[in-house]
Image: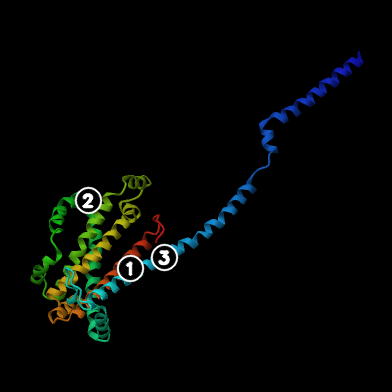
Amino acid sequence: MSAVAESAAGTAAATVKAVPAAETATHPTAALETTPTEPTTTETTTTETTPPETGAAGPARTALWRSRLIRVVSVLAAIGLWQLLTVNDVRAGLRFDALPTVTEIIAEFGEQLGSQQYYLDIGQSLIRIVTGFGLAAVVGVLAGIGLGRSGLLSDIFGPLTELVRPIPAIALVPVAILLFPSDESGIVFITFTASLFPVLVSTRHAVRALPTIWEDAVRTLGASRWDVLGRVVFPGILPGVFGGLSVGMGVAWICLISAEMISGRLGLGYRTWQAYTIVDYPGVFVGMITIGVLGFATSGLVELAGRRVTRWLPRQARR
């Protein structure tokens, strides 16, 4: 009997030992524990994909230089075509024979660069554009926020704004002459009016286009009205504001030159018109080119400031 008992006990012990081994072999947790983790593989994959991203800067740089080269070549081609048409006195519907050649304009440019009057005119026009445009930027942004946020202000000033906005700023020259005691103040007023409405309208539309959920989310956190303006409204409208500023700068130059031609005593517009009245056509083109360069530079500064201020916006790769 004792032998039978010992045999049964040994069988039971072997069964008990076999069951955990079988469970260990078939249990999923045990299989996962015995399977090696893969962080090394992930790190290796990441390391292998880094060089192609770094090497992509080469084609992007090549595309950038190609774009700049095309722009320079296009300008040089236009200048060459101008010289070709004017030197050969071409008349093909347009009287190119009446226009100065590129060499004549360059010679006139050299004379202007050597005269003090040229720099006085540039300085006077820049002072007027900075003063008028700067005032329009401040007033336009504040008025646009007010009209976009307040229904009462929109009801009071909205109709007046829409009635005055279609009037060309240059048409206000007689009003400026009557209102202001000096020509200088009148010209700044014309420049201010010209650039005011693009800034005001773009700011108003940007305020009204803001998602209301942004303001609601900030208010639920206990933000005050000034917090909403400073942390939600103003940052959110910056792209639209700078779009209006860029347009306003171009319009300001157009109306400034026109006002200087009509009632100025100094400035690029006045000097360009004077050159026309004395049949100095190379001088006319020198004035036009100078105005174009200054307009291009000031608009570029506005756009550069906009990109710096709104650097948090996602952007496409520049070409």
Q: What element carries label 3?
A: helix
Rendered position, 279 above or below 138 = below
Q: Residue 74 carries which label?
A: 1
The dot on residue 66 is 3
Q: Is mark 1 on a helix, strand or loop?
A: helix
Among the 4 quarters of the image, the one containing residue 317: bottom left
Label 2 crowd (10 A; few <14 / some 14-19 / many >=20)? few
Q: Which of 105 and 116 is in front in this view?
A: 105
Q: What's the residue at 75%, 25% (across, down)? A: 19
Helix, strand or loop for disc 2: loop
Q: Is residue 4 above or below residue 33?
A: above
Residue 218 percent coordinates (x, y): 36, 48
Examine the rendering and report whether any part of residue 265 can be seen.
Answer: no
* Residue drawn at point x = 13 percent, y = 59 percent: 164
Residue identifier under label 2: 150
Where 147 falls versus 127 (above or below)?
Answer: above
As shown in the figure, which amino acid type bears the numbered disc 2? Ser
